[in-house]
Image (cartoon, grey):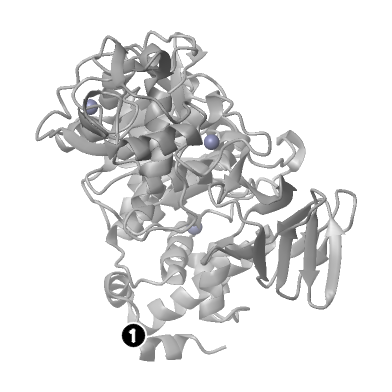
């Protein structure tokens, strides 16, 4: 089940306003530098500013607003030529922030994150500094398939995050590239995959794989063909890891056909030469050595030995990845023609995406999937190394890393009951409350600003540390507020405006006596502006104003049309005549 994703935060309960003293200073969320368009080797790209694009042409220089379209190219001196209107500048690097659209090789992408452009070897190097969780979400959307569902996407998100954070990937200008060399990342969001990728990335935010209390390494590939590869079979120089052994996979073998392809000597020669693996003039190609899974580890080309994974990558890069999709193959030769028959797609180490999707379809959990492919490894929070525990109560499950959170369950249960009482909604499906161990963990996971106390998306609630909320007497009101959100989201149809959902929560969160003070007040913002501000407030004051205005508008709706009608409109959307009537200022 995929629900449209929504961002709703209890901005009324403010950490800053409650006294910033005991809160750590607001720092930047954990980020990764991701190489963009790394296989294109662009020499020139066009920049189109958004309303707030800032440009910086050197490290100590001031940021300036970029008003006009610009072009940036790699020059002959290892630097950049920047052309803005009539002005040409030679610079070493440029930084763009506040949102910008990049265009090259007939592709455009609009980025909100900071972009740094430099040059290396006559081509442009584009590095995008993005929050870890946004990176994971993009990769999960790009690497997942239509057969994936909730639990296999969660498992994939954990593997993708682990791979990104636990290894260095050998790129001098950024942490990871956007090709399959690291993990594939498409810069456009895919309407079919992005909402589910977002949801399952959020549900596993910050979780990585660990083995006996130490950070583990993780890999995934499309289809292991019925038996996974051990680490040593594919990358003999990497230290072995007991959880990356070769084992049979009974989940992906169903309807697993093999593959076959034919390549000419000319094609193979050009592919091998492109990676410097062999010069022209060779005669015979045969398997030299196989590993424990049956995959080819080394090939023999006349008298030289070629590593099979290097061979697969050389053929893939120059002739297409479907020619020799895995190293699990037989090869035979007839004159200048070479016939390959094999199984599986990808290196075969770690998680098998085909098997994971099949396990999820059979009702297995993400933890069962990860145990299947990383035997003995377990998931834990990247920063604390602790695992998440689930404590189920009527109507909700608390996920926490702290055993000392258990006493707060009583307040949570009370908040849940009061939310149902005030709204009249009481679905049987339980909500998930994930209590983060620190403000920074909360903010890194949700990308919500640090002044937000909690955050609801669909039936999933994230909160700041429960002890912090309790110490400020905010636990009950915050949780009641968030449970109200979750209850309303459960009822809401796709056309229910944000101001209606947020305003109802605001009103139901407060005593009806207090509504009397709200009635004569005039909203500051128009209805459309309230929705925009609820989604993208940059300051706490703006968010507060938007919440208050939402409450005023909803009060007009309740006074004018009654509660039953308002609840009906949560499902169907508010008709235009009612909008016009309550929208007057
Ligand atoms: Zn709210
Ligand atoms: Zn890479
Ligand atoms: Zn498999």
Viewer can see residue 567 = yes
Relative to 89, say whether 230 is above or below.
Answer: above
From the Cβ of disc 1, is ligand 1 less than 8 Å away? no
> Can you give x and y, in whole percent of width and height, for residue 106 in the image?
52, 67
Q: Residue at x 80, y 51 (%)?
A: 79
**226 or 54, which lies in front?**
226
Q: Residue furthest left?
A: 255
Viewer can see residue 411 = no
**272 or 36, which lies in front?**
272
Q: Is residue 483 left or right of residue 544?
A: left
Q: Is residue 506 left or right of residue 494?
A: right
Relative to 14, say whether 153 is above or below.
Answer: above
Quarter holding residue 487: bottom left
> Can you give x and y, in whole percent of width and height, for residue 405 in the image?
47, 25
> Can you give x and y, in whole percent of width and height, for residue 275 in the image?
50, 32
**387 or 253, which lies in front?**
253
Relative to 16, say whether 156 is above or below.
Answer: above
Q: Which class describes the residues within 10 Å of circle 1: few (<14), some (14-19), or many (20+)?
A: few
**SS of the residue under disc 1:** loop
Relative to 105, say whether 237 is above or below.
Answer: above
Q: Residue at x 51, y 79 (%)?
A: 527
**415 or 532, which lies in front?**
532
Q: What residue is shown with label 1?
A: 575
Q: Is residue 3 left or right of residue 67?
A: left
Quarter holding residue 411: top left
Q: Quadrant of the C terminus?
A: bottom right
Q: Residue at x 45, y 80 (%)?
A: 556
């Amino acid at each position: 089940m995929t629900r449209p994703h929504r961002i709703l935060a209890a901005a009324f309960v403010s950490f800053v306003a409650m006294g910033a003293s005991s809160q750590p200073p607001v720092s930047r969320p954990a980020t990764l530098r991701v190489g963009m368009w790394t296989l294109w080797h662009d020499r020139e790209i066009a920049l189109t500013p958004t309303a707030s694009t800032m440009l910086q042409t050197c490290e100590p220089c001031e940021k300036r607003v970029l008003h006009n379209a610009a072009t940036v190219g790699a020059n002959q001196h290892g630097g950049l030529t920047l052309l803005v209107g009539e002005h040409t500048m030679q610079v070493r690097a440029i930084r763009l922030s506040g949102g910008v659209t990049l265009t090259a090789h007939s592709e455009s992408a609009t980025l909100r994150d900071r972009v740094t452009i430099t040059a290396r070897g006559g081509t442009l190097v584009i590095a995008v500094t993005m929050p870890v969780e946004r990176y994971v979400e993009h990769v999960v959307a790009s690497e997942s398939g239509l057969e994936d569902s909730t639990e296999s996407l969660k498992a994939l998100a954990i593997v993708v995050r682990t791979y990104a954070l636990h290894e260095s990937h050998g790129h001098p200008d950024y942490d990871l590239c956007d090709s399959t060399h690291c993990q594939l990342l498409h810069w456009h969001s895919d309407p079919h995959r992005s909402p589910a990728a977002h949801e399952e990335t959020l549900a596993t935010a910050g979780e990585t794989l660990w083995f006996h209390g130490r950070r583990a390494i993780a890999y995934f590939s499309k289809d292991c063909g019925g038996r996974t590869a051990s680490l040593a079979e594919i990358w003999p120089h990497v230290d072995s890891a007991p959880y990356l052994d070769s084992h049979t996979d009974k989940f992906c073998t169903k309807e697993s056909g093999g593959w076959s392809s034919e390549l000419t000597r000319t094609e193979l020669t050009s592919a091998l030469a492109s990676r410097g693996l062999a010069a022209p003039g060779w005669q015979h190609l045969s398997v030299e050595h196989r590993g424990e899974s049956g995959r080819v580890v080394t090939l023999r080309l006349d008298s030289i030995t070629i590593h099979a994974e290097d061979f697969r990558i050389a053929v893939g890069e120059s002739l297409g990845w479907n020619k020799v999709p895995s190293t699990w193959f037989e090869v035979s030769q007839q004159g200048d023609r070479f016939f390959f028959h094999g199984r599986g797609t990808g290196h075969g180490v770690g998680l098998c995406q085909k098997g994971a999707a099949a396990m999820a379809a059979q009702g297995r959990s993400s933890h069962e999937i990860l145990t299947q492919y990383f035997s003995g490894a377990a998931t834990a929070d990247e920063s604390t190394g602790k695992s998440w525990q689930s404590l189920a109560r009527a109507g909700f499950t608390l996920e926490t890393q702290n055993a000392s959170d258990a006493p707060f369950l009583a307040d949570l249960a009370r908040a849940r009951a009061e939310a149902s009482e005030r709204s009249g909604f009481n679905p049987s499906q339980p909500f998930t409350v994930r209590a983060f161990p620190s403000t920074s963990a909360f903010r890194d996971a949700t990308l919500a600003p640090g002044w937000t106390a909690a955050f609801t998306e669909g039936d999933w609630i994230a909160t700041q540390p429960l002890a912090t909320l309790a110490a400020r007497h905010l636990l009950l009101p915050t949780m009641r507020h968030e449970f109200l959100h979750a209850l309303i989201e459960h009822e809401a149809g796709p056309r229910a405006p944000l101001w209606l959902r947020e305003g109802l929560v605001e009103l139901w969160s407060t005593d009806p006596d207090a509504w009397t003070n709200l009635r004569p007040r005039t909203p500051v913002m128009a209805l459309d502006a309230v929705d925009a501000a609820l989604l993208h407030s940059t300051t706490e004051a703006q968010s507060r104003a938007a919440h208050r205005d939402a409450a005023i508008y909803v009060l007009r709706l309740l006074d004018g049309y009654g509660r039953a009608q308002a609840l009906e409109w949560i499902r169907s959307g508010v008709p235009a005549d009612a909008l016009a009537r309550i929208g007057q200022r």
